[in-house]
Image (cartoon, rainbow, N blue to C red):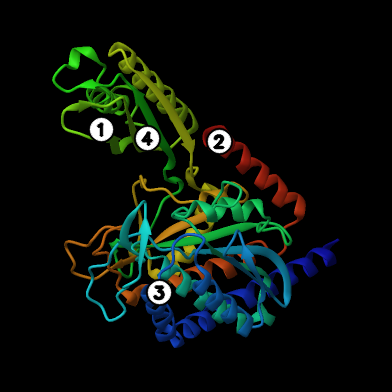
Amino acid sequence: MKKILTTILSISCGLAFSQSALKPKINSGADAIEQKIISWRRDFHEHPELGNMEVRTAKIVADHLRSLGIEVQEQVAVTGVVGILKGGKPGPVVALRADMDGLPVSERVNVPFKSTVNTIYNGQKTGVMHACGHDSHVAILMGVAEVLASMKSEIAGTVKFLFQPAEEGVYDPKLLKNGKSGAELMVMEGVMENPKVDAVFGLHISSVTEVGTIGYRSGATMAAVDQLGIKINGKQTHGANPWSGVDPIVTASQIVMGLQTIVSRNVNITENPAIVTVGAIHGGIRQNIISESLDMIGTIRTFGTEQRELVHRRIKEVATNIAESAGAKADVTIDTGYPVTYNDPILTEKMIGSIEGIAGKENVKVQPVQTGAEDFSFFQQKVPGFFFFLGGKPKGSTTPAPHHTPDFYIDESGFTLGLKSLAHLTVDYMEMNAVKSTDNQATAKGKKDKKVNKYFKD
């Protein structure tokens, strides 16, 4: 027995040493291809593509992965690309994800690689822009693939590179497959299986986080998002005789104000924030006609299953009862969107040292929950995952433009930190899990799933 234990320990130490020894190679490899990553990013930025239209981007990614000797799967979830790098030694399967799509935003930033792409969206002409940094994500993950592929024989495990379409949604209904988009469809099509993924890591560039720093949070990190629709049916009449009809516009005004009391009076905001926003109201055709109906659309952000259910119920009660009091009728629809982006606490605790080791402990900050949403959460529903924010704000900048705006700008000097972080997470996870038994992994995963399902069944 003593001899067997000594042998196992020897194997374990050998694997641990070999994986730790990769870090200097990762760092030097990342530094060597920094300009290549920046060039990729600028090319993608100049040629943005909307959700499920990322044909050009996907081809560049697939060609690059093939050139590295990585197994490639194309047209996953419409335009997605999956690369599988099988290391020379046995070990766990780690998935790394980058989203590829742009947004219907007209760019105002005066850079040589400014996007001049235009499209028609919702009947309006608009530009197309990488206004959320997905071009950076793709370029960084292509760099990770190149660096890790160069040391394939030394890697103790398998790496799955998930280049995902449509994180921002699908803008052309004809391209929406099975009513799903982005990460959800990739999961449905089996990207987390064959081989089965053990853990998933991802990053998001941030225009409001200083370059050289990284933000993260354990547990609930980004909000669940749902889409709200309310149709109000009144009674049309002449604008000069409002008593002869039922005004859906006045009713809508009351409903908008009523919805805000859900957050201020029904949600325990000391535990988790929530948001109910009406983003658009469409109704009426002429100044002296009270219209027959009106449509409202909006977004809902929550951070827990019970909170989500409460907000949904109260929206329906508030809208229908206010409409009824006005003699109108409100039909409420809530389309479920992305779940909560949930960083597994056990995984986060184990892996944060990898980030601190490369960025410096003083440059890694715990940040508040984000009311933005991310479909990376669909991958986290399948396996433990860790999602973090990479600084992209220029040093000294005091008024950085937010994401999804025409003035969105990223400092490219932080890209190699993103590459090193993802690669270090990968080899460190492989080192930690190199000799764990299948039973132990299943037990740990079962405990995690139980905890997540209890509080975040989104």
Q: Earlier in the sequence, mark 3 or mark 2?
A: 3
User: Which residue position holds label 1?
Assistant: 284
User: Disc 1 versus disc 3: distance between alpha carbons?
Assistant: 39 Å
Does any portion of residue 125 appear in the rendered image? yes
Dot 2: few (<14), some (14–19), or many (≥20) neighbours within 10 Å?
Answer: some
Dot 3: few (<14), some (14–19), or many (≥20) neighbours within 10 Å?
Answer: many
Viewer-side label of 4, 3:
3
- Asked if labels 3 and 1 touch by Cβ distance under 8 angstroms, the answer is no
- Identify residue type, mark 1: Gly
User: Which residue position holds label 4?
Assistant: 272
User: Which residue position holds label 2?
Assistant: 457
Q: Earlier in the sequence, mark 4 or mark 2?
A: 4
Where residue 219 appears, as percent x and y from the top left, is 47, 45
Where residue 167 appears, as percent x and y from the top left, is 47, 56
Q: Residue at x 61, y 57 (%)?
A: 199
Q: Is residue 438 left or right of 245 when viewed as pictured?
A: right
Q: Quick check: 29 above or below 402?
A: below
Q: Earlier in the sequence, mark 1 or mark 3?
A: 3
- Asked if labels 1 and 2 touch by Cβ distance under 8 angstroms, the answer is no
Which quadrant does the N terminus fall into? bottom right
